[in-house]
Amino acid sequence: MKIRSKASMLLTTLSMFSTTLLLGQTTIPNGDFENWQNVGNSDEEPTNWNGNKTGGGFANLGPQTCFREDNNPHSGTYCLKLDNGSFFGTPVNATATTGRIEAPSTNPSAGYINTLTTNPDFNSPFVGRPDSLVGWFKFNQGGTDIGRIQAILHDSFDVSNPDQGGSAAHIISEAIFDVPNGTTSTWTRFAVPFNYTNGNIPSYILLIATASSSPGSANSSTTLWVDDLSVVYCTPPTATLNEVACGSYTAPSGAVWTMSGTYQDTVAFGGNCDSVYTINLTINSVDTSVTTNGTTLTANAIGAAYQWVDCNNANAPIAGATDSVFMPTANGDYAVEVTANGCTMLSSCYSFVLSNVNQLSDAASINVYPNPTKGQFTIDLGTNHNAAILITDINGKTVYQQTISSTKVVTLDLDQPAGVYFLTVASDDRYSVVKLIKH
């Protein structure tokens, strides 16, 4: 059995206790490998860690494989050096653990490592749910050996690895780092996540570092150096967002909200690293409804900006069609883009068919004079009408648009360059088109 002095055990306990108080979270005991016990003896090992010389069964009969290295540690004065060995021709995998190495026979495949919850020399109390296991390593590969650094979080059960029966149900999380194939000659950082199987809080951590992860495959040329092992706790990021959206809002988690209010949103990353947002949301809406009366399309939004578009031409804007009232000059499907309250939204598409509108004969229902004109001209409707007046150029661009109520005669001034224009007058379900020439 490993002998620890009372003073050493007290200092270690006080150190772990003070760290837990300061951080509120448990850390790995002696993860920097600065503290060693039984120095100079055959069972010299890192404090809180155990090698094969303090193992059970045949384990302690083999050579020491766990060494204190003071030549080029990653930090501090010492690091852990694991050198494979052999015992009467049987390979001995160099291993250090916070549990106990057990070798029931000389057959390497029968060996295992376990936590002994009733023996403080072979367990490491641990309360916390860290996100990752991190540390530094160097590796000199002999043969096909692959080094491994592993952490097992578990409850108050003598968990064993490999499992000797019943351990699986007591494991809360594992973090496993397999050293890359080949030699890593410089100190290299690794970080691996803890993968949690349930929401329980652990009672112990079983740490295992080995130069060869396959029992009985140890090559005498393989060496693994380990230093500065630690666990990382993620603090849940929190933030308050003040968001303004048009119509709907997609939250960081992907949730979609369509009403103003204060919401809680969580983005799950696993472990303790979920991001939590408080979102003060304002949803602005735009009235995109349209009224049709057979000859015109009218956007119902008040005090907004308008742009009519051609739905059959990839919603291309229609030149000059920027009023609330739109009189199409061709069959098609049309929509209006309405801008208000800091939002721009598109209406549904509305079908418009000129063939369904009764065209009045120019002579019988409308008189435009003078035509040609130098600019000013008069429209005589014959009788009072509620009507919409539209003037477009030869390219179809709207250059003038007006609605009138109960009016017979309208005088307008065409403030445009000389050329050919088309005057459309629409009343109820009837319309007239007159070619207008300006000198």
Image (cartoon, rainbow, N blue to C red):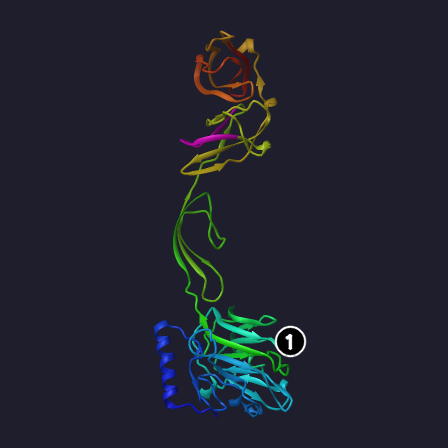
Q: Is residue 177 above or below residue 265?
A: below
The segment highlighted magenta reads: 296-308
Q: Position of residue 366 (x, y in %)?
A: 52, 11
> Who's the residue at 34% across and 73% down the image?
22
- Of residues 392 and 330, the one drawn nearer to the viewer in this rendering: 392
Question: Which residue is the extreme one toward the top?
Answer: 370
Q: Position of residue 438 (x, y in %)?
A: 50, 11
Q: Which residue is mark 1?
A: 144
Q: Would residue 95 be seen by someone viewing this image from the given angle?
A: yes
Left or right: 343 as drawn, with respect to 105: left
Foreground residue among 128 and 20: 20
Left or right relative to 431: residue 10: left
Query: Horizontal and vertical percent for residue 393?
Result: 53, 18
Question: Which residue is drawn at the image coordinates 48% and 69% (left, top)?
Answer: 132
Q: In the rendered picture of this protein, how many numbered marks are placed on residues?
A: 1
Magenta-drawn stretch contains 222: no
Question: From what the image shows, is residue 156 above or below residue 236?
Answer: below
Tell me residue 425's x, y (percent): 51, 17
Determine whether 346 is above or below 418 in the image. below
When asked about the image quadrant of residue 300, the answer is top left
Q: Secondary structure at mark 1?
A: loop
Q: Is 66 in front, or is 390? A: 66
Q: Classify 10 Å Cα crowding around label 1: few (below 14), some (14-19), many (20 and above).
A: some
Residue depicted at 45% across the width and 20% down the height: 402
Q: Residue furthest front?
A: 71
What residue type is disc 1 on? Thr
One can see residue 204 in this view: no
Query: What residue is at 50 percent from the left and 53 percent from the top?
Result: 254
